[in-house]
Amino acid sequence: MTGYRGRFAPTPSGPLHFGSLYTALASWLDARAAGGRWLLRIDDLDAARCHPQHTTTILHQLEAHGLIWDESPRLASRHIAEYRAALERLRRDDRLYYCRCTRKRLARIQFAGPDGSVYPGYCRESGFDSGALRLRTTSGQLELNDLFCGNLLRDAAREIGDFVVCRADGIPGYQLHCAIDEAAQRITRVMRGADLLGSTVRQRIVAAALRLPSPHYAHLPLVVDVAGYKLSKHNHAQPIDASRAIDNLRRALVLLEQPAPEPALATPADILAFAVAHWRPARIGSSLGRITAPFPIGLQTGDLALSTQRNHGG
């Protein structure tokens, strides 16, 4: 057993879809091949979107595919006090300010950065005593060495800007609680989709501000349809069928560009054992551009494709 600690962190706003399985499988295989542990976190802070029945379904889906976690799942909703204590530390360090910008104003004043919109600090000196809380991003260069994307550099102030760490309704922001959760679970590697690269940069900033350790990162190529839409709940991706676990695992391994298990392997455990023994992360994303998958996976907007959407720091 090594010190490797990986994790999968679904949001229980619905069952897992194929894109979720693809990510979970990659993370699980990477942990198992390293002789490490694989943990589960449930990002259930937004009670309006997240429901306990979806958490139960997600756990059953993972179990049906043989993706078993090593410790009790961490439910973000049970750690509100930790997030609020972190906000108080940031407040004492004068790193927070209230922002009352509306969506209309944000659309007018924000500008495009390499990882999403950049907020120019409109409310920094406003003195508001309510609203969303933003983290003051200090000047300096941030370096991220990613397993698949390579070495990325960002100017924190000019290319990231100030970002929300607590919503106006009091719910701790995603970037804040993720940074805290990674440290609390002692995660050493996060394997996630390339669409979360911008979140990773922001979480690194939060961790530095709180003097917390940050894990190493590996951003997987995105699963998209032929029109370029990400496979997601928002885009009406269909839930994976747990009764077809063997087919699902084989198809996910195809997208991960891993060796195909022998046809005689007829249980999830057999397929996973083969996949661990033959795990080669260096093969992932080795083909630039788009790779159309040779099978349907239940996305309403079209056939599946694999896009190696990469961000090289500019």
Image (cartoon, rainbow, N blue to C red):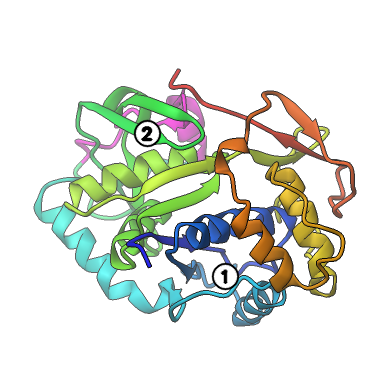
Which residue is the site of mark 2?
145
Q: Residue at x 36, y 31 (%)?
A: 160
Residue 33: x, y in percent?
51, 58
Does residue 12 appear to the left or right of 127 in the view shown?
Answer: right
Instruction: For the C terminus, give its image quadrant.
Output: top left
- Please give the label number shown on residue 48: 1
Residue 173 is tagged as none
Is residue 237 visible in the rendered image? The answer is no
Residue 55's spot in the image, x, y percent? 60, 77
Task: Name the element at disc 1.
Answer: loop
Classify mark 1: residues with Cα within 10 Å, few (<14), some (14-19) or many (20+). few
Choose top left, top right, bottom left or bottom right for residue 176: bottom left
Q: Amino acid at mark 2?
A: Asn
Residue ranking furthest to the left: 92
> What's drawn in magenta, residue-wise?
103-126
In this rendering, does residue 304 appear at all?
yes
Q: Residues within 10 Å of mark 2 (few under 14, many from 20)?
A: few
User: Is 112 above or below relative to 56?
Assistant: above
User: Of the residues tagged 2 and 1, which is closer to the observer?
Assistant: 2
The residue lying at 63 percent from left, 67 percent from top is 13
Which amino acid is tagged 1? Answer: Ala
Q: Residue at x 47, y 62 (%)?
A: 7
Q: Is residue 9 above or below residue 91?
A: below
Distance (Cα) linking label 2 and label 1 = 36 Å
Q: Is residue 238 magenta?
A: no
- Mark 2 or mark 1: whose residue is earlier in sequence: 1
Q: Nearer the viewer, residue 161 or 34?
A: 34
**Picture quadrant of residue 285:** top right
Q: Say which residue appears at 71% left-offset and 56% top-offset.
A: 233
Q: Where is the N terminus found, in terms of image quarters?
A: bottom left
Q: Left or right: where does residue 58 sit relative to residue 96?
A: right
Q: In the visual, does 201 lie left or right of 30?
A: left
